[in-house]
Amino acid sequence: MEISENNFIKGIRKFSRKSNSVIRGIGDDGAVAELGAGQYVFVQDAMAEHVHFEFSFMDPYYVGKKALYSNISDVLAMGAQPVFYLVTVGIPAGISSGQMERMYRGMNRVAREFGVTLLGGDTVATAKDLFIDISVTGKLAGARYFGRDKARRGDLIAVTGKLGEAALGLKVLKEGGDATGMKNCVRRFLSPAPPYGLWKEIVKDDITDVMMDVSDGLILDLSRMMDESRKQARIHWEKVPMPRPLRQRGLEELAFGGGEDYQLLFTFPREKLPVVAAMIDKGRAVTIIGEVVSGRGVRVYRHGSEVTSPPGGYDHFGGRL
Amino acid sequence: MEISENNFIKGIRKFSRKSNSVIRGIGDDGAVAELGAGQYVFVQDAMAEHVHFEFSFMDPYYVGKKALYSNISDVLAMGAQPVFYLVTVGIPAGISSGQMERMYRGMNRVAREFGVTLLGGDTVATAKDLFIDISVTGKLAGARYFGRDKARRGDLIAVTGKLGEAALGLKVLKEGGDATGMKNCVRRFLSPAPPYGLWKEIVKDDITDVMMDVSDGLILDLSRMMDESRKQARIHWEKVPMPRPLRQRGLEELAFGGGEDYQLLFTFPREKLPVVAAMIDKGRAVTIIGEVVSGRGVRVYRHGSEVTSPPGGYDHFGGRL
């Protein structure tokens, strides 16, 4: 282990930003923060070496960024503004202090973007592989949380950005080959910034209280939402937004089954359609892909006919509790 | 991987207790809880296989218990009542669903003991070893947090329970041999319940606002407290409470350098001495071991003479941020 503990922790302290609400930051058994009364969102999500990433194609800077982005994505998807985070890194022998520094720099970059404060966490040795586990606390932005359990019959289903980008980006990183026109996809895999501007508009315009992020693939994630809401989703193959290279290469199924895009998936009642249509007219990256009906599960229609075995979501084992 | 994700997560839901303050529990991108205004403590702490434990001598039930105890210990040491926790488990191939179930049962046992509610977390596959990382949020019990940075010149230094028990317990588990009279030590290593009753008395009697838990060994932890407080600690070898087998086996240094006892270390002003003395008279496991003076670091005295190279704390690398 190249890292000297005390120096390392002192090094991390510089990323602990001053905040009026933080009474006691890094340097004690725990951090102390002053909170106003209200509803708060709690999330915790990890990434493990050789499972979610390899250092051969992902610099620690991006591991740090992505680990925090994915957690912030969850907080936004619950309708909350992220406020604090804590991070545990499991560090195997052979990781240099430079690599650790880059990982924390990546997190710090994201923390500034969202105004989130590092409160603390832990560093532990591991026998073999690196892991990073982050918890984020957010404060509800509106009067009620955005839940998977609130989709209603007649709601329309929409998604931000394009789907399948991260899966294609990962394919490029792993397999190499011609990457022309796929820079966005690689960036989406390495640095999946949640669509914060769009989220703020959705909150401001009070469009919905039914939202989740697309972390495991459209079909799998949407089926979880329908499970929780006890409804059925019908989506239209042609409408699902995907990057051009997916269609060109015959990889459209990655838009349905590829994970880690961290786009926002939401339903909204038809009376909000004018507001959503206005967003789309202004060029916002929002696409209506289907509707909620009675029943269960997800059905995919292509040119009006049901696709009998739609491409499923992938499951990088485990999953959020 | 023997574990089927969806069934597993459904299995975990049973441990998510109903609580008035929990608006949305397991089953969404995050949990939602209602909090009153005030000061809150945030901690996050991990344990890794082959570093902090081996399944050969530690059943998953105890891994779960200890992981949550150690986090709760941090929250108590900050002067807060633990309220919620989230847990991430990194699961290698070869772990059975029965083992996972026992780990969550261990956590659940501890959660009941302290009235803490499981809010969520994550499960991820790992390439090789298991890790468990827990975050706990607590609410300040009194008007101010208990900090390492508040020790004052003239304060007395006290500790709960006995020190070195966990280190001796680990030695017994690893090396085998005659374990007569060491059941308590083995239990302390496997299941280090923080001294909750004593903590409540200390809070109720308003004895201190300077506290930490002994996780890495008395000398190392006390030196951290002195660092933060910019003071010096003088402790008396004879007074340090330790289990009889340590003295019998000439292993007294484990009381100074052995970690993971999760006892509470605190200082208090002399005007509180009558209250602490009354606790001790009632048979409470509190021992006064020294005093705070001007200077830096920790000095150990034995029969009045300074011990020139006192046994240091051990450092299971990394450490709390």
Image: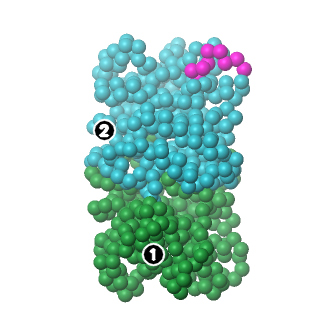
Chain colours: A green, B cyan
Give me the chain letter of mark 2: B
Disc 2 element: loop
On the picture, is B42 further left or further right than A175? Answer: left
Residue B181 is covered by the magenta coloring: yes
Label number found at residue B107: none
The majority secondary structure of the magenta stretch comes to: loop
Highlighted magenta segment, given as a residue range: B177-185
Disc 1 element: strand
Q: Which residue is mark 1?
A: A159
Residue ID at (63%, 13%): B248
Residue ID at (60%, 62%): A315
Label number found at residue B144: 2
Give me the chain letter of mark 1: A
Q: Position of residue B19 (x, y in %)?
A: 36, 44
Q: Position of residue A213 (x, y in %)?
A: 47, 67
Residue B41 is covered by the magenta coloring: no
Q: Position of residue B297 (x, y in %)?
A: 49, 32
Instruction: Tell me which amino acid carries mark 1.
Output: Val
Q: Is residue A7 visible?
A: no
Q: CA distance from mark 2 to mark 1?
A: 46 Å
Kindly indicate the quadrant of the structure image that contains residue B99: top right
Q: Answer above or below: position of B301 versus A22.
A: above
Mark 2 surroundings: few (<14), some (14-19) or many (≥20) residues within 10 A: some
On the picture, is A255 further left or further right than A111? Answer: right
Q: Nearer the viewer, mark 2 or mark 1?
A: 1
Q: Position of residue B266 (x, y in %)?
A: 41, 28
Residue ID at (51%, 85%): A304
On the picture, is A186 further left or further right than B285? Answer: right
Who is closer to the viewer here, A137 or B55? Answer: B55
Instruction: Tell me which amino acid carries mark 2.
Output: Arg
Residue ID at (59%, 69%): A312
